[in-house]
Image: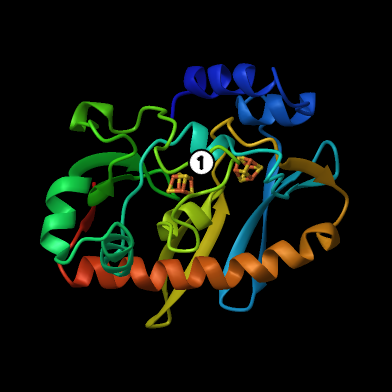
Amino acid sequence: MSQKEIEESLDLLQKDWDVDPTLRNFMLGKITDVSDRPIKVKDVVFHVPYLNSEKKFILWKCFWPDCHNCCDRQGRLPLTSDDLITIGKGLKYQKPSEFIKNETLTVTYSEPGPSGQMTTMTTINLKRKTDETEADDGTHISCRFLNDEGGCSMHPDRPGVCYLYPFSSWLENEKGKPRVHATYQFTGDCPGFYLAEDLEPMKEEFKEYSKIIYDYNMASNRTNREGFGSVSFS
Ligand code: SF4
Ligand code: SF4
C-alpha cells in the first residue's frame, strides 16, 4: 500500500475513531526511530515495533463488534485448501470445482515481503462481491458476507485470512525447521492500535493469535504444496 492510500484510509478512519497522533505519524512513515522487539509466544515470533523517542510499544486490541472496518474495507480474501473445502460446503456446493468456478477468482499480485523484497503470489480468492473481477483485486470492497449486525454470515467457517488481520505473517527457515514470524500490517483501517510502556496489556492477544497465526501458516504452506497457489521472490 502506498503512503497516500494509508493516509486516505486514516482520514476515513478518523471520522469515527480517535487515532493517537503519534501513531498516525508512525503509520505515515514520519517516525523512523523505531526498534523491532521480537517476542516469542509459543510457536510464533511476534515483531513488535518500539518507538524509541516515546519509549513505548505499539500494541493492539480488537474493537469488534463496535468496529468491523476490516470487513467493510476488504482488499483481498486468499483461500487456503482447507478454506476451499469448508467454505464451499458452507455455501452448499457439492463439488469444490463448482465452488471455485462460481465464487472465486485466481489472481497474481506482488507485495513487498518482510525484508522489503517483492513477493509475487498467485492465490484463489473468495469474491467479496458476486460480480467481482480481477480488476477489483486489492481495492477496498465491503464484503458481501458482512451481515446487518456487523458479524460474518460465514462465522466460524470464514476464511483463515480473516482471523489474521491486522497481522501479517511469514515462514522462515531456522536451523532446518520452519519458524513462523508475525508483525502488524498498518493499512490505516484498524482503530485498535495503541501505545504502551510494556507488553503486558496484550498478553492474551499474543497467546490467542499465536495459535491462529501458526495454524494459518501451516494451512497456507499446504495450499502451495498442493498446487492451489504459489509464492515467488524477486
Ligand atoms: S481488527 Fe481492527 S478493523 Fe478489524 S474489527 Fe478489529 S478493530 Fe476493527
Ligand atoms: S468473509 Fe466474513 S470475516 Fe471475512 S471479510 Fe467477509 S464478512 Fe469479514
Q: Where is residue 123 in the image (x, y as percent from the top left)?
A: 23, 51
- 196 over 96 or under it: above or below: above
Q: Can residue 141 be seen in this view?
A: yes
Q: Which residue corresponds to the image point at 43% horizontal and 30% vertical from the top-left?
A: 1
Q: Which residue corresponds to the image point at 28% horizontal and 33% vertical from the top-left?
A: 137
Q: Which residue corresponds to the image point at 81% horizontal and 42% vertical from the top-left?
A: 195
Residue 147 lies left or right of residue 219; in this view the side is: right
Give amino acid for label 1: Asn
Q: Position of residue 32 (x, y in %)?
A: 66, 33
Q: Position of residue 139 (x, y in %)?
A: 36, 27
**Mark 1 burial class by Cα count in 10 Å: few <14, some 14-19, many 20+:** few
Q: Label 1 belongs to which residue?
A: 147
Mark 1 C-beta to ligand 2 under 8 Å: yes
Residue 41 lies left or right of residue 136; in this view the side is: right
Please tell me in which quadrant of the rendered image residue 161 appears.
bottom left
Q: Which residue corresponds to the image point at 58% horizontal and 32% vertical from the top-left?
A: 189
Q: Is mark 1 on a helix, strand or loop?
A: loop
Residue 149 lies left or right of residue 34; in this view the side is: left
Please tell me in which quadrant of the rendered image residue 143 appears.
top left
